[in-house]
Image (cartoon, grey):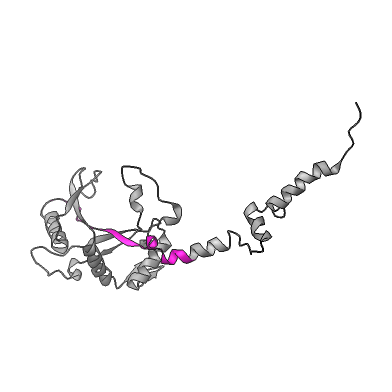
Amino acid sequence: MGIIPFEPRRILAPILRGRSAIGWCGWRSPKVAIERRHGRQYFSKSSKQQAKMAGDKSNNPMRDIHVDKLVINCCVGESGDKLTRAARVLEQLTGQKPVYSKARYTVRTFGIRRNEKISCHVTIRGELAQEILDRGLKVKEYELLRKNFSETGNFGFGIQEHIDLGIKYDPSTGIYGMDFFVVLKRPGARVARRKIQQSRVGHPHRLTKDDAINWFQTKFEGIVLDEPRN
């Protein structure tokens, strides 16, 4: 048996053919090599597709932000007639029957017992939520603090007197303060709450603190402060 002579062509030919097929320089894909072979200009994914995605996001209706719900809470810290009058104020403001909330712990300092009704709240959706939210922000002169916004894209604020919302003062009722909690959403958030084929909302589609601030500034021409004004 003789010695097989070394022939570099047998070893290098398949490699050279592979280089021409896949575009060896830069490890480009076959699609890239074909496009360059036909004289077409190739745009990488980092330039062309990112520019396309950036342009589509501004016009994509699925990126629009809407008010999912508005929750108004009025906590009086005790049960009895005072809580009943506070619930009457919320019903007069929203036209809906409030729900009572119970204390989770016993706080002897404030005279609160566990499972005692100490507050009431109501949840509003749709156009009525937009109307009442606008009235509440008008009381705040459309100024909120940055810490009023959460990392999940929601925000809240409080008012000290309910008569500032346009409700007529009643001496037998008194004056109550209340807290506004606004939950924002984008279309498609239902996939995380439905029972059938439930899935998670993708990270690029989730609301962030900056998204909520930009929406507030654009929608209401609001002002976001880092610290409260003296």
- As rendered, which of 190 and 2 lies closer to the eye? 2
Residue 227 lies, in percent from the top left, at: 40, 68
**Visible in this render: residue 29?**
no
* Residue 156 in the image, given as x and y percentages of width and height: 31, 61
* Residue 46 is inside the magenta segment: no
Q: Position of residue 97 (x, y in %)?
A: 14, 55
**Residue sitting farthest toward the left:** 172
**Is residue 93 left or right of 145 when viewed as pictured?**
left
Query: What is the magenta range?
Result: 55-79
Is 59 within the magenta?
A: yes
Say which quadrant the N terminus sits in: top right
Q: Which residue: 40% across, 47% down?
A: 200
Residue furthest to the top:
1
Question: Which quadrant of the view contains residue 157?
Answer: bottom left
Specify the quadrant of the image occupied by residue 147.
bottom left
Name the quarter where the C terminus is drawn: bottom left
Query: Is 117 in front, or is 1?
Result: 1
> In the depicted view, which residue is nearer to us: 7 or 197?
7
Residue 25 visible in the displayed image: yes
